[in-house]
Amino acid sequence: MALSRDLTKNDPADLDLTDPVHLNRTYAVADALLDSGADQDQLRQLESDLISNEADIPLLLHVAAKMAVSRRIIQNLSGPAHLSVVFAVYKEHQRILPPDQVAGGEDFLVRKVKQLEWLFAGRDELTWDMIVVDDGCPEGSGRIAMEIVETRNWSKRVRVLFLAEAIAAGVPVTAPLTTADDSRKGGSIALGMWAAAETIRDNHVIVFTDADLSTHLGQTGLLMGEILNGGCDAAIGSRREPNSVVIKKGVRNTRGKLFIYLWKRIIGILPDVVDTQCGFKGFTASVIREIGGDLLEKKFAFDIELLIKVRLRRQDSIARVPVAWIDSEALSTTTDIQPYLPMLQAIVGMYRAYLPAEDHAEGFAAFIESLDEQAWNRLVENIPAGITQREPAEFGGFSGVSADELRAAAGL
């Protein structure tokens, strides 16, 4: 703890995702922690100590500590192994640019590559590739990504796919989409993961993430360790664990609580999972080949369908991984989108497709199906205190707010 405090005593409290100086400092601090000789257990203890003193700790130190644990895991892995990172782009034509070209630019493709190069440095038997999928972007995000790849001569490691082209070619994993406009990230992530899994590799882990820099890919070793060392089929980044570090702006928390409460009433197979929507999840390639080819959901709720199918396949197969996550809102493409109701209604479809009917779940499913946007907005304005005054981690075992109470709150 003394070393870490000394390393960051002159650093700002916040971490600016558009500032190269800030971002480069995270590598320097993580490297210093690793150079101290601390083993994985000692670094994890440092994580916990930092959390207990969170208010006094610069954000970059929290991020660097998780990066250090992650890289120590990678350094200790026995090879060979391969990582594929997949993310979708939609209206990312500004955020993909460096900040000296556009205000709020994150230069995220360049920085993601740097993050993986740092993580795997010195481990030639551990390899990686990256797949960027254009989700039908009208601003040509995929084309810009291709230009960056070609300019930097990254074509052997980074490829760009276009969902619209895959649909037109009849690639089976895109069914039943008829146009990229029918996808909201899910269709592109499914395509990217399926493309990654087509090549058979030893110890192959596929991770999907968000286009922005909210989750530093230097933390990917945390997911790989749970899969390759822990024997899990999936490892999911979570922003709601005791050792998670989250900087979230805006006022979306109570809506998020309502969303979690409702989906937990109908998807009982995931009682231990709270954060389904963190864009940082890893799977074995073999599992993706088995469950990823026929997903029902091609929009924002696709994460939950993947988790349901993984859990149905093998009960104790999902690891929750506390991560450092920094809200990236300056040029966000989803800040003004409120997809909770469509997501919940898609989740009802998953319940009916994959799980046996239960009286309790049926009541909530019917309530969700009865909602329109006006009723949903009324409900959001009148969320019962039994939900707002509890933490989402409690919702797996709490069902004290009935569907009838919610129906009344929605004015139905």
Image: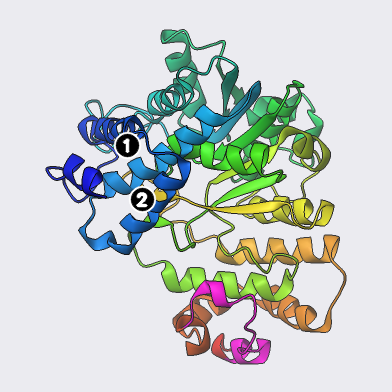
* Front-lying residue, 159 or 42: 42
* Quarter that holds the C terminus: bottom right
Question: Would you say 89 lies left or right of 182 here?
Answer: left
Badge 2 crowding class, 10 Å Cα cut-off, few under 14, some 14 to 19, many 20 or more, is many
* Front-lying residue, 143 or 2: 2
Badge 1 crowding class, 10 Å Cα cut-off, few under 14, some 14 to 19, many 20 or more, is many
Which residue corresponds to the image point at 81% horizontal and 32% vertical from the top-left? 172
Identify residue for label 2. 46
Q: Quote the CA–CA distance across marks 2 and 1.
A: 10 Å
Answer yes or no: is residue 211 visible.
Answer: no
Which residue corresponds to the image point at 49% horizontal and 76% vertical from the top-left? 391
Question: Would you say 357 lies left or right of 348 here?
Answer: right
The magenta stretch is 390-408
Question: Would you say 211 lies left or right of 98 here?
Answer: right
Q: Magenta stretch: residue 234 in it? A: no
* Front-lying residue, 233 or 212: 233
Mark nearer the N terminus (2 vs 1): 1
Is there CB contact under 8 Å for labels 2 and 1? Answer: yes
Residue 127 position, x and y percent, is: 58, 19
Q: Magenta stretch: residue 391 in it? A: yes
Identify residue for label 1. 33
Q: Which residue lies most toward the left here?
A: 10
